[in-house]
Image (tube, helix red, strand yellow):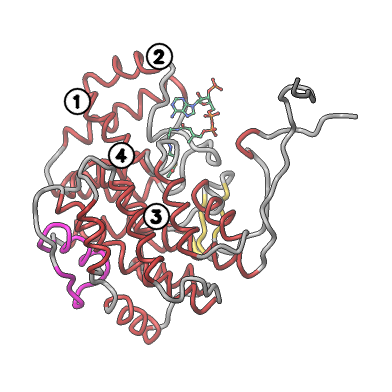
Amino acid sequence: MTEPEIRKGLSGVVVDYTAVSKVNPDTNSLLYRGYPVQELAASCIFEEVAYLLWHGELPTPDQLLEFETLERSMRHLDHAVKRVIDELPLTCHPMDVVRTAVSVIGARDPRAEDSSPEENLAKSIRLMAALPAIIAYDQRRRRDLHLVEPRDDLAYSANFLHMTFGEVPELAVVSAFDVSMILYAEHSFNASTFAARVITSTLSDLYSAVTGAIGALKGALHGGANEAVMHVFDEIGSADRAEEWLDTALAEKRKIMGFGHRVYKNGDSRVPTMKAALDTLIEHYDRPDLADLYDQLEATMGARKAIKPNLDYPSGPAYHLIGFDTAMFTPLFVASRITGWTAHIREQAASNALIRPLSLYNGPEERHIG
Ligand code: ACO
């Protein structure tokens, strides 16, 4: 009997249909519900993209107004969540804080077990609205600063930055941040989304699925890479040291964070848009040194390994320039990807089959005690 083929990491395995997004590495394109992500980043705000991912269509002006009003009404940090966050040590990773906070919100939701499409949509909007407050509060407490209350006269990204820094930055900064939120929102069956779908497939609740997805996103091979990129930049220091640093790192067989992708082998479709946003920030904050380091490392990686940057490569330094601590970068990814995760959770629930693959046993032959 021939052994079944094992595809480590499920590489190249197609496990289901999805109508949420389409990744096409051959044409280097990414579509959310049919729309190229570059077009969405150029023409929409994050709220419109969230609506699109959940409803399948962009909102009309009336629908957007209704959605914005709802989202803005749920931006306050729940006192119980705040109390739990206050109990967490500053030594824990901000992703642990986000994961715990989502768990608390779920435990306190009397409708947590109701997984109807309407309830799961309501929970998705609640989490989208709550995450900026959680992340901003955690960033501020790590700087020994008090909570800033949300403003309901501001759009999502402006309010997020207001709650984090106590003021709304200039439009160029808010726009660059909003673009990053749009680009991070969805990417088909990536590891964290798949984790969310696996959990949903057991008929578990949305909060459990999101909590599991946050755990999957934390790792450096996935969302944790945007944070790891900044550590690489800090380690290298300046453009003139990039070549030597990279040669040493490659000789030590290190994975260079922010480069490579499981699906895209000729470049990540989201990078040019995020790089343009980073360029705006570099100009705004007058940091040509960062641009030089970015370009030098990318060029050297291209020359040595022909491996291209992924979205985390420009977004890491972008979040650094905006003023976030490096450890907060992956939670920002959560704030955005909550929209894609929950779109997939609802899709999985609507046409469910328990996800339960097989394995080939390679342990000891059958044996007996005594
Ligand atoms: N640095 C150095 N070498 C790399 C890198 C990298 N970043 N990425 C791939 N390679 C090399 C591998 O060493 C391997 O070489 P080999 O065949 O000589 O052994 C080859 O390219 C294939 O790499 P795999 O790791 O097998 O490819 P896979 O599809 O499993 O990996 C992954 C994709 C995990 C993203 C990988 O490129 C990586 O570790 N990158 C760094 C982490 C990172 O940036 N993750 C963010 C992903 S995108 C996102 O979450 C938005």
Earlier in the chain: of badge 4 and badge 2, it is: 4
Secondary structure of the residue carrying tag 4 is: helix
Residue numbers of the magenta segment: 149-168
Earlier in the chain: of badge 2 and badge 1, it is: 1
Percent from the top left, x then y, of residue 293?
24, 29
Q: Which mark is residue 252?
A: 2
Residue 362 sits in which quadrant? top right
Mark 1 crowdedness (10 Å alpha carbons): few <14, some 14-19, many ≥20: some
**Left or right position of 158 against 269:** left
Residue hosting label 3: 183
Depth check, mark 4 against mark 3: the one in front is 4
Q: Farthest residue to the front: give it.
A: 370
Alpha carbon separation for disc pair 4 and 2: 21 Å
Secondary structure of the residue carrying tag 3 is: helix
Task: Indicate the amino acid at tag 4.
Answer: Glu
Task: Indicate the amino acid at tag 1.
Answer: Gly
**Left or right position of 307 against 365:** left
Percent from the top left, x then y, of residue 6?
72, 33
Residue hosting label 1: 237
Task: Indicate the amino acid at tag 3.
Answer: Leu
Q: Split into 4 quadrants, where in the image is the C terminus?
A: top right
Residue hosting label 4: 227
Q: Residue at x 23, y 71 (%)?
A: 76
**Left or right position of 304 against 363:** left
